Amino acid sequence: MAWTWFHRCGSPPHFYRIAGKLVPWFGTLAALLCIGGLIGGLVLAPSDYLQGEGYRIIYVHVPAATLSMMAYAVMALAAATGLIWRMNVAYAVAASCAPIGASFTIIALVTGSLWGRPMWGTYWVWDPRLVTELLLLFLYLGYMGLRSAIEESGRADRASAILAIVGVVNLPIIHYSVDWWNSLHQGHTLLKLGAPSMPPSMYVPLIAMIFGFMLYFAAVLLVRARGEVLRRERTARWLLEVIGEG
Amino acid sequence: MLEWLSMGGNARFVWPSYGITVLLLWLNIRWARKAALAARTEARRRLAMQRSEP
């Protein structure tokens, strides 16, 4: 049963139709969660006893940083699926992840930098967390650069898939960098063993924002992947059926 | 309201953070829709060419 579902998802017409149906749901839920999260984070949550109001950058910084890694994990997983099962749809998903993931990484770096200035007194330090996040941006850019440098689509898919898979090693390093090395960056806030180091009035909006960003990522990814599937399916007959739809 | 906007003196760090986030999220939606539309137009053109071939 699970394999039937998996192989159906690998069918371009099936993927195209299902993705088209999911996008409005994901988009609407993402907007609702982000609006709720922003009201909770910017208006209702109390000031931080140490950082005052400046900590409110957390409501965009942490979701963006989380999604920068999650988008990479999805990209690598899709690339590996494409390599193992020679699934064109999986390659299309992997290729679609990169620009969105790179955007999340830029947001995480810029908002982190803007948060660092009032808290640390500097926009940038060569801290393990910051450096590994910057490396993640270079991995995304490298992936996109490699894809565009190879003209033949099949070779571009395979070569970029290998780069994406190798780059996965950076994800646990980013996550655990604050535990493994002395870091100026604060430790885990939500995924802390025991309990989060925030009251619910602060972490509930943060969780809403993280889920909102996840759904936003899913919606934009599916829109991009649908376009990518259309671009790859040059002469398929099913295009005749779907091209006139919505 | 003004007090809230000033973010305890951190407005120049907080609001640009939200600004760049909204901007990039909006641009991603725009780019994704543009790419999907271009792929659709191209696919339609290809199919029309195929149909017109003898």
Image: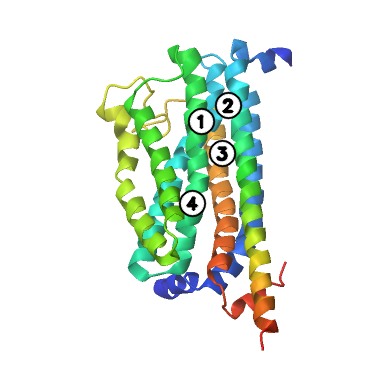
Please tell me which residue lies in front, A120 or A47: A120
Q: Chain of mark 4?
A: A
Residue under the point 61% across and 11% down: B8
Residue under pointer 2: B17
Q: Are marks 3 and 2 on the same chain?
A: no
Q: Are marks 4 and 3 on the same chain?
A: yes
For disc 3, the neighbor class at 10 Å (few under 14, some 14 to 19, many from 20) is many
Picture quarter with the N terminus of chain A:
bottom left
Task: Name, please, the residue furthest toward the left.
Answer: A180
Q: Position of residue A236 (x, y in %)?
A: 56, 78
Quadrant for residue A173, please give it.
Answer: top left
Please tell me which residue lies in front, B40 or A121: B40
Q: Label 2 amino acid?
A: Ser
Q: Chain of mark 3?
A: A
Q: What is the CA distance from the residue labelled 3 to the residue labelled 2?
A: 18 Å
Q: Viewed as shown, does residue A221 lie left or right of A36?
A: left
Q: Earlier in the sequence, mark 3 or mark 1?
A: 1
Q: Position of residue A133 (x, y in %)?
A: 39, 34
Q: What is the CA distance from the residue labelled 4 to the residue labelled 3?
A: 22 Å
Whether residue A198 can be seen here: yes
Instruction: Tell which tag, 3 or 2, sits nearer the viewer.
Output: 2
Residue under pointer 4: A97
Residue B9 versus residue B49 in the image, above or below: above
Residue under pointer 1: A61
For disc 4, the neighbor class at 10 Å (few under 14, some 14 to 19, many from 20) is many
Q: Are marks 2 and 4 on the same chain?
A: no
Q: What is the CA distance from the residue labelled 2 to the residue labelled 1?
A: 8 Å
Mark 2–mark 1 CB contact (< 8 Å):
yes
For disc 2, the neighbor class at 10 Å (few under 14, some 14 to 19, many from 20) is many
Residue under the point 39% across and 59% down: A79
Q: Chain of mark 2?
A: B
